[in-house]
Amino acid sequence: MERMNMEDKEEIKNIKFDSLKKLIYDIFIKLNLLPSDAKIIANILSNADLRGIHTHGVAKIPIYKKRIELNLINTKPQLKVLKNSSVTALLDGDFGLGQVTGYKAMSLAIRKSEKNGVGIVGVRNGQHVGALGYYAMMASNKNMLGIATTNASPSMAAPGSNIKIVGVNPFAIAVPSGIEYKFPIVLDIACSQVAKSKIINSIRRGEKNIPDNWALNSKGRHTKIAEEAINGILMPIGGHKGYGLAVIIDILAGVITGAAFGKGISSNYGDLINKQRNGLFFMAIKIDNLTNIAVYKKRIDRFIREIKSSRSSLNDEEVFLPGEKEYRIAEERYHGGISLSNYLYKDLVLISTELGIEMQKYF
């Protein structure tokens, strides 16, 4: 997932982490969520902003609010267990907020893993689920390997094509570190060169141009123009490799679970008529069932030391593990507050005013 540049000159408002979480909670209570579900989405969205993943934090509230008001998101979903075994389950998300469904799905996978060593949970009739690293870390926090995937509406073409046929289909894998290093190792990426929200944010900041390896225009040609990219085709990371990975994730999250897949998934932003019907595929694997957890922690610490000691003697740049930068950002912001860009703050003001929430008490 793409991270917004934290040195952006527009970041003018600072809010404490707990205050941001409370504001998000209050917004979704006003939007008719159950208190328990409002707590879940408040935790997940605020955590994204805490870790510097602003594309999947409060920036998503306006579109969720709109889709709730259009009855495209069920504020009181009734999750159903369609299939169940000792290590697997298939859920119907009942078109609830993706974060609520995702949290409950991974929680179930973790419970199965705690009892039987592995838990696999698929979901159909889901919606946009946000930053997947959160769910993978739910497992890694329990000394498990966590894997979280979801499919998305088509935004990338197959090699040799100029038709959107597969989504960016993000995935996250998280494992715990050892004793010496406290941060979990988290790979959280989409199969595209950048997330579409990165281009949206560029436009909102008044930036006309983007790097030419982000997207193709609607005619299948490389473009540097942000407006063309929005209506164009995202490029897969690593060419055919990113495309191939996106296909496999669509099969896992969509085809196998009975969820929508490929062109059957509606766009979160571009389709305000149909529900999304995304699929999810989550796994939790108990490390202690594969190797003694104490031995694992010693070995992973040694592996981390090897990687971090590989820094070049030609410069003074530090070598980071996946997820380490986000961990450090979160540590800093938990104590110093979270900076929000001007347009994000204005969105929150507008939404809070509409819902009768007094914004200033949170800042």
Image (cartoon, rainbow, N blue to C red):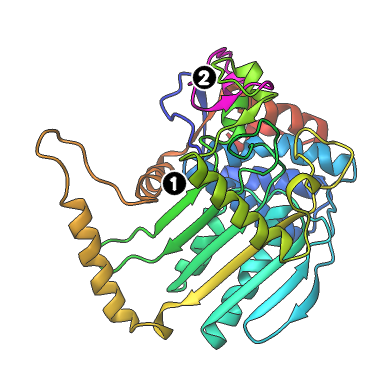
Q: Can residue 194 be found in the magenta stretch?
A: no
Q: Which residue is mark 1?
A: 334
Q: Which residue is mark 2?
A: 210
Give coordinates of residue 64: x percent, y percent. 76, 41
277 vs 335: above or below: below
The mark that comes first in sequence, 2 or 1, is 2
Tell whether 44 sits left or right of 164: left
Query: Which dot marks residue 214?
Result: none
**Which amino acid does the dot numbered 2 rest on?**
Ile
Magenta-highlighted residues: 201-219
299 vs 26: above or below: below
Of badges 2 and 1, the one in the foreground is 2
**Which amino acid does the dot numbered 1 rest on?**
Tyr
Q: How busy is the neighbourhood of tag 2: few (under 14 within 10 Å), some, or many (20 plus)?
A: some
Count of numbered marks: 2
Give coordinates of residue 195: x percent, y percent. 57, 36
Instruction: Give the CA distance from mark 2 to mark 1.
Output: 31 Å
Q: Can residue 216 be found in the magenta stretch?
A: yes
Along the line of sight, the residue nearer the viewer: 229 or 21? 229
Q: Secondary structure at mark 1?
A: helix
Give coordinates of residue 151: x percent, y percent. 67, 51
- In the displayed orientation, state which residue is furthest to the left: 313
Residue in the image at 48% along x and 36% along y? 3
